[in-house]
Every structure is written in C-alpha cells, then in structure tokens.
Image (cartoon, coloured by chain):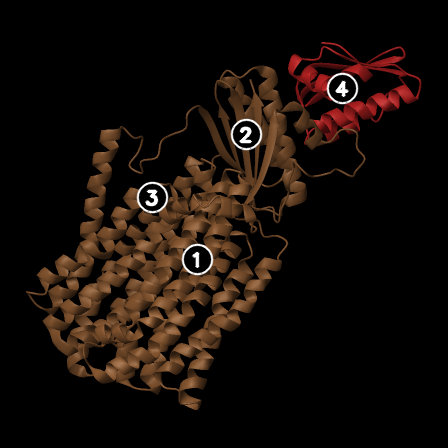
C-alpha cells in the first residue's frame, strides 16, 4: 500500500493506493497519526480497490479525530465496490463521501 | 495456495486411536478370552471358544447396523446443517440398537441348547462347554450395543478421550476378571464369558460422561418416534458394515466345514489359530477404515469432492501402511504367533509356517478392499459397497476354497489371497463398465462440481487470511462475478479467517480449507477449520467497536450458516447475484 500526503493550507490530502485490509491498516494508522498541522483532511480513495472492517475502522477513527478538532473530513474518488461497503454499513450518511 | 489434506488428515489421525480402541474391543474380548482360556483351562475349552466365534459375529450384526448406520447418517445430516434430522437419527438408531440387541440376546439364550448342539457337532463335552459360554455371550450383547454406540457418537463429537476410555476400560476389567473368575473362583469357561460381561457393565458407567457432556452435538428427541421412516435410511446406510458380520459369520461357518472335511483335526487347529490371528489384522484394517467413514460422510454431506478424494488417498495410505506392517510381522514370525496359542506340535507348525505365510498375503489386498468399500458406503454408492462386501466376505472365498481344497492344504489356504485378488479384479471391471455406461467423470463414480470452483487451504493466521481474500476476489472477477460482489466475498473470506485465527485457532500450524463456488444465481463460500468451537452466527462482539468484521460480513452477504461436525467448524456464506 502506498500513502501520499499533500498539504494545501489547512487541508491535508491523503492519497491511498492498494488494499486497506487487516494487514495494511496498521500502516495506514501510523501514517495518519501526524496530520502535519492540517485542520481538514481529504482522503483520496481513487486507488483503493478493497476495504475490510480494519480499514473501515481506521477511516472512521480518522473522521472522528478530525471532526472532534473542528475540522472537515471527506473521502473522495471512492470506487463502487468500496462505496458499497460504506453504503451497506450506513457510514455514507455520516461521512462526506463521494465516488 | 493449493488445497491440502492437512486439516482432513489431522482429523483422521485424531479419530484413529479411539476407533482402533473400539475395533479392538470388538475383536479382542473373544481373542483374549481364547488365549487365557487356553492357558488357564486347556485345549478343549479353547476349541469351544473358537467354535463360538461365528456367534460373536452374528450378535454384532444389529449392533453394527445401528451404530454405523446411525452414526454415518447423523453426520451426513450435520454436514448438510440439518441438526433436527441428525438428532432424530441419533435417537432412532440408539434406542433401536439397544432394543434389537436385547431381543437377539433373549432369542439367543432361549436357543442355547440347539445352538450348542450345532456348533459342538454332537460332541457332548464340547456342547456343554459351548452352552456354558453362550449364555454370558448373549447377555453381553445389549452392553456392547450401549458402549459401542456411545463410543461412536462420542468419537465423532470430538470427545476422543471418552471414546477411547470406554472400550479400553471394559477390556482391562475383562482381562482382570478372566483371571479372577477362572483361576481364583474356578468358574470354568463360563467365567471367561462373565468376565467380559463385568468389563462391559462397569465400562458402561462411562457412558454417562457422554450424556452429561455439554459439547455433544446430538441429543435425544421425542420427535424421533414420529419419524420412524428414517429407520430405512439408517439400516441401508449401516448395511455394508453389518453385511461384513453376516459374511464373516457365513464364511466362518462354511470354511470351518471345508477345512475339517479336507484337512482333519490338524487342519482345524491351524484354522483356529490362523482365524484368530486374522482377527488381529481386522482390528487395524477395520479400525482405519471405520475412522474414514465419518470423515468421508461429513465431506460427502458438504459436497466437498476434492476433500473426499484427499480423505480417500490418506485413508488408503494409512490402512495399507498398517496392513503392510501386519504382513511383515506375519511373514517373519509365524511360529512365535502360533506359540502364543499353544500351537507347538512340530508336525503341525511345519505346515502352519507355510499356510499362514500364504494366507497373510491377503492382508494388504484386504486393506484396499476395505477402504474402497468405506468410500462407496460414505458416498452413498451402496450397491458398490455391498458388492465388495459380499464378494470379499463370502462369494469368492468359499467356492475357491472348496475347489482348491481338492488339490492340497497349501492351495486351500491360497484361496484367501486369490479370492481377494479376484474381488479387486471384478470390482475394477464393474467400475470401468459403469463409468463408461453412465459417462461419469472418474472411476470413483463421483461427479464434478456444477459451476466454477476455487478450492484451497491456508494456515490459520492473519497474514494468510488477507492473501486468501486477494485470491478469492481475483478468482471471482476472472469468472465474471460483478466487482462489488467479488469484493464482498473477499471481505467475507478475510473477516472470517481473521476471526478464526484470533478466536478458534489452537496452533499456527492449523489449516483452514476455503471453497468458493460461482454459479449463475449465487456465490457460495465455505470455510472449514478444526479449531475451538467458534460460531460466527452467534458470536457477540463485546469490544464496543462500531465496526466489526462479523457485522460487516452479515451486512454484505445474503446468508451465513454454521455447523460443528466431527470437530470441524464449518461456515457457509452465500451471496445472491
């Protein structure tokens, strides 16, 4: 899994590429601990073809952390199969998430 | 990642010891009684015991029918996740086994005098000895039914210690009482029989351990009495096992007659020792194949074709391996084996040394026949199983022995290996003809899967769980499954394997078998492991987490079913298209 961070003012875009599963989610967890002082976070899921509960938990945890600090959190370029997981679990209603 | 037999082989090995203990109990009581009687009482009493061997087979017919019929059928229903029917089969077969054994015991006791007269062949001394031994032998029948049926279900429920302890306890007490009743109390030949009864009676207290066990998976149900039509299925499933005893009874009856008329009393002495030693080989061959029966039954119930082939291969390997060991011992040490029974007359042992070696060649062929018979029995190809039993047990050996007895005593004993070889040849011809006539996929006459199948095994750890998910998604997409459904099946594989690794795995070397079938209407995923009981349909996550693997699987799939069968956790997930 490849994680690329791009800062633009108050907003940090985190582009993820690969599978977000039980094995890779600890890597994601470590990568998003430091938000480089950004208030808002955009997760670019354009390269994520698969997400399991471990990946979903990390995404939701990041969302809670960012919004708790008054920031905005969004997930963009979500592939249909991954979007299905967010929709089925009802997180599409809690998160700002788009395909 | 390939489908391996690791999981099935491990379960087979786990079941093997307790099954061997059970088959040993079925044969050893009469063998040990015979040896001890020969040592303590004398040769006349030993002859009387030998003449009752056919009755031992006769009384085991209903027991084998209900024990193996009921046990195999119950496991098949559990394999199909029909626990109600499994309970019904358990209730019917258990009580029918007890009642029929009581009935046959009552009839047997009532007919003691005429039975002793037939077996004793008008020898008054022999007749009275046989009659004295027959009464405890018949009394033993219901106790054997109780112990063997309980041991069979305990074994397939994973209660291996209990299943092993039951027959061992009974036989250890039997041995002690043999000495006590015959040597100390002076009860004579009847003492040998009552010693066996005492052993089984005290051993049957262990039965309570099974019925008190919280982990047993079959239970008595009153509904059973409304569904007695299942009796037919139980009997037809158990028939090949029971047929072995029928054929053994008939074979012993006829071969004894041929041997006596062709070779006289010296030949009869050779026969009694040879048959008794042959019973020792049955302990291993029958034990190894009876272990295979529930394993194959469960795999057949799950329609796991690859698993059936893997189990057959491993079962064949173990059974033939054991039989070769017995063959080597028989070929190397015929005289010490004969001496165990007190057969030391040089004139007789000179002949026995040759005849026993000739006869023993049949052992590995017998192993092949037994494994194939078990396979056909478990895969519901009963007609083939029955053909094998009748050919092997009776139809080939008796005519061949009669014909060969006209030549000399060595040819007479060659009828055993020759008849086994003839049985194998006839069976192969039948299989080839049937395969071609019915256009079956293989010579085992089992059909392949309808649909695209992915069948592989992983180690029971988190690292390999995600690899399995990758492989599954790839396979589904290659076979035209919609991307989102492929993803969901992949998630199900990962989550369930991760849960198994976390909560059920006993060791890192354990395996998980994964099976995915893509058909037009659905994608079916089946996971099997041999870890601790872990039911994903009932598991309540108490970690307080908002997102859990099992919740996700439940929401992404159409159905999840779980079953615990012969120590396997089997989870089946379906995603409708």
| Distance in Å between CA atoms under marks 4 and 2 | 25 Å
CB under 8 Å between discs 3 and 2: no
- What tint does the image give chain B? brown
| Distance in Å between CA atoms under marks 3 and 2 | 27 Å
Q: Is residue B427 left or right of residue B513?
A: left
Q: Is residue B200 left or right of residue B31?
A: right
Question: What x and y, as percent, mark residue B546?
Answer: 79, 29
Vertical side of A97 occupied by B495: above or below = below
CB under 8 Å between discs 1 and 2: no
| Distance in Å between CA atoms under marks 4 and 3 | 51 Å
The image quarter containing residue B358 is bottom left
Judging from the image, what is the letter of the chain drawn in red?
A
Q: Is residue B408 left or right of residue B172?
A: left
Going by the picture, which residue comes out furthest to the right?
A70
- The residue wearing badge 4 is A90
Q: Do the residues indicated by labels 1 and 2 lie within the same chain of the protein?
A: yes
- The residue wearing badge 3 is B376
In front: A5, or A85? Answer: A85
| Distance in Å between CA atoms under marks 4 and 1 | 55 Å
Question: What x and y, as percent, mark residue B40?
Answer: 35, 86
Q: Around disc 1, counting alpha carbons within 10 Å, would you say few (fewer than 14), some (14 to 19), or many (20 or more)?
A: many
| Distance in Å between CA atoms under marks 1 and 3 | 24 Å
> Which element is circle 4 on?
loop
- The residue wearing badge 2 is B525
In front: B448, or B509? Answer: B448
- The residue wearing badge 1 is B97
- Circle 2 marks a residue in which chain? B
């Amino acid at each position: 899994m490849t994680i690329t961070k791009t800062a633009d003012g108050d907003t940090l875009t985190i582009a993820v590429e690969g599978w977000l599963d039980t094995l890779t989610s600890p890597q994601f967890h470590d990568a998003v601990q430091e938000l480089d002082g950004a208030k808002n976070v955009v997760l670019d899921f354009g390269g994520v073809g698969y997400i399991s509960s471990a990946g979903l938990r990390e995404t939701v945890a990041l969302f809670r952390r960012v919004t708790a600090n008054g920031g905005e959190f969004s997930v963009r370029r979500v592939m249909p199969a991954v979007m299905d997981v967010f929709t089925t679990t009802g997180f599409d209603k809690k998160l700002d998430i788009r395909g | 990642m390939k489908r391996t037999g690791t999981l099935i082989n491990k379960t087979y090995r786990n079941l093997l010891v307790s099954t061997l203990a059970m088959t040993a109990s079925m044969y050893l009581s009469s063998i040990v009684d015979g040896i001890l009687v020969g040592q303590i009482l004398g040769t006349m009493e030993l002859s009387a015991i030998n003449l009752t061997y056919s009755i031992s087979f006769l009384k085991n017919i209903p027991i084998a029918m209900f024990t193996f019929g009921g046990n195999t059928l119950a496991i098949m229903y559990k394999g199909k996740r029909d626990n109600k029917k499994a309970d019904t089969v358990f209730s019917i077969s258990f009580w029918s086994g007890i009642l029929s054994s009581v009935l046959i015991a009552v009839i047997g006791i009532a007919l003691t005098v005429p039975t002793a007269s037939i077996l004793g062949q008008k020898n008054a001394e022999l007749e009275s000895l046989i009659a004295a031994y027959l009464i405890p032998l018949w009394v033993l029948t219901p106790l054997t039914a109780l112990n063997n049926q309980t041991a069979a279900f305990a074994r397939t429920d994973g209660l291996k210690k209990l299943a092993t302890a039951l027959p061992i306890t009974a036989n250890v007490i039997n041995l002690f009482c043999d000495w006590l009743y015959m040597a100390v109390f002076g009860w004579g030949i009847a003492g040998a029989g009552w010693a066996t009864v005492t052993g089984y009676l005290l051993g049957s207290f262990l039965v309570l351990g099974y019925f008190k066990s919280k982990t047993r998976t079959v239970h008595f149900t009153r509904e059973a009495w409304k569904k007695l039509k299942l009796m037919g299925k139980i009997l037809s499933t158990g028939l090949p096992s029971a047929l072995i005893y029928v054929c053994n009874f008939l074979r012993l009856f006829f071969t004894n007659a041929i041997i006596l008329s062709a070779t006289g009393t010296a030949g009869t002495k050779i026969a009694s020792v040879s048959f008794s030693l042959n019973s020792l080989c049955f302990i291993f061959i029958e034990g190894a194949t009876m272990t295979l029966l529930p394993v194959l039954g469960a795999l057949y119930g799950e329609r796991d074709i690859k698993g059936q082939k893997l189990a057959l291969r491993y079962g064949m390997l173990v059974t033939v391996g054991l039989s070769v060991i017995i063959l080597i011992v028989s070929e190397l040490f015929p005289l010490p084996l004969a001496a165990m029974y007190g057969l030391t007359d040089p004139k007789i042992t000179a002949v026995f040394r040759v005849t026993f070696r000739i006869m023993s060649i049949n052992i590995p062929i017998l192993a092949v026949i037994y494994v194939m018979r078990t396979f056909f029995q478990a895969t519901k190809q009963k007609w083939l199983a029955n053909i094998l039993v009748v050919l092997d047990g009776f139809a080939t050996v008796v005519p061949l022995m009669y014909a060969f007895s006209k030549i000399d005593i060595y040819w007479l004993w060659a009828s055993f290996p020759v008849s086994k070889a003839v049985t194998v040849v006839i069976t192969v011809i039948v299989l080839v003809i049937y395969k071609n006539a019915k256009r079956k996929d293989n010579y085992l006459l089992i059909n392949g899967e309808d649909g695209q199948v992915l069948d592989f095994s992983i180690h029971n750890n988190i690292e390999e769980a995600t690899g399995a998910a990758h492989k599954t998604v790839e396979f589904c997409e290659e076979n035209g499954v919609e991307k989102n459904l492929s993803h969901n099946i992949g998630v199900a594989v990962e989550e369930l394997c991760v849960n198994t690794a976390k909560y059920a795995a006993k060791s890192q070397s354990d395996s998980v078998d994964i099976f995915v079938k893509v058909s037009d209407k659905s994608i079916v995923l089946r996971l099997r492991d041999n870890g601790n009981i872990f039911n994903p349909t009932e598991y309540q996550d108490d970690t307080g987490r908002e997102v859990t693997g099992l919740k996700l699987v439940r929401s992404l799939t159409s159905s999840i079913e779980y079953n615990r069968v012969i120590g396997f956790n089997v989870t089946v997930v379906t995603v409708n298209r």
